[in-house]
Amino acid sequence: MTDVAIRPAVAADVPAVVAMLADDPLGAARESPEDLTPYLEALERLASDPHQLVVVAERADRVVGTLQLTVIPGLSRRGATRSVIEGVRIHRDDRGGGLGTVLIQWAIDESRRQGCQLVQLTTDRTRTDAHRFYERLGFTPSHTGFKIAL
């Protein structure tokens, strides 16, 4: 897919990224596209952290996908570094054409480049299509995740 460029997200991308985050039943309940201030502040914090990468996939000068990649040095697994993929979204009009695969493969390749020994991600248990997608790419559902809202 040579017509897609993956690059770091910039402030001008935030409206398109937030629109993608909000464009599903889960995101519609937790995102607020009408007020971009907290998203712009978050992108600024993320951009200043060398362990965080927020990228967009761009096609024909249009943002069509996004994800966040976090690199975490650790002690477990013999001091292994791991990466976590979060916030994966593909624009509604661009799903089903291989763009998600390109974006995830970019994240895996970048993780290798940064010396990671493990790539992990979470996805809501209701996103069964996403589960099939990630398994097709070689991810295994090996853990149960927990969280607590603060």
Image (cartoon, rainbow, N blue to C red):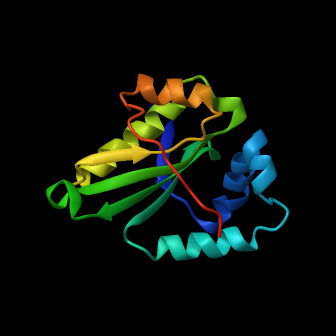
Residue 55: image location, x then y, percent: 50, 54
Report the quarter where the C terminus lies: bottom right
Answer with left or right where residue 40 lies relative to residue 141. Answer: right
Residue 75: image location, x then y, percent: 21, 64
Seen at 71% across and 33% down, the residue is 92
- How many numbered marks, from 0 up? 0
Seen at 51% across and 70% down, the residue is 46
- Closer-to-camera residue (144/128): 144
- Closer-to-camera residue (13/120): 120
Residue 106: image location, x then y, percent: 39, 42
Vertical position of residue 82 compared to residue 58: above or below: below
Vertical position of residue 131 compared to residue 6: above or below: above
- Residue situated furthest left in the rendering: 78
Seen at 76% across and 57% down, the residue is 31
Answer with left or right where residue 88 lies relative to residue 102. Answer: right
Residue 17: image location, x then y, percent: 66, 53
Answer with left or right where residue 123 lies relative to residue 106. Answer: right
Vertical position of residue 47 compared to residue 141: above or below: below
Seen at 51% across and 23% down, the residue is 132
- Closer-to-camera residue (116/6): 116
Q: Quadrant of residue 12?
A: bottom right
Vertical position of residue 11 compared to residue 129: above or below: below
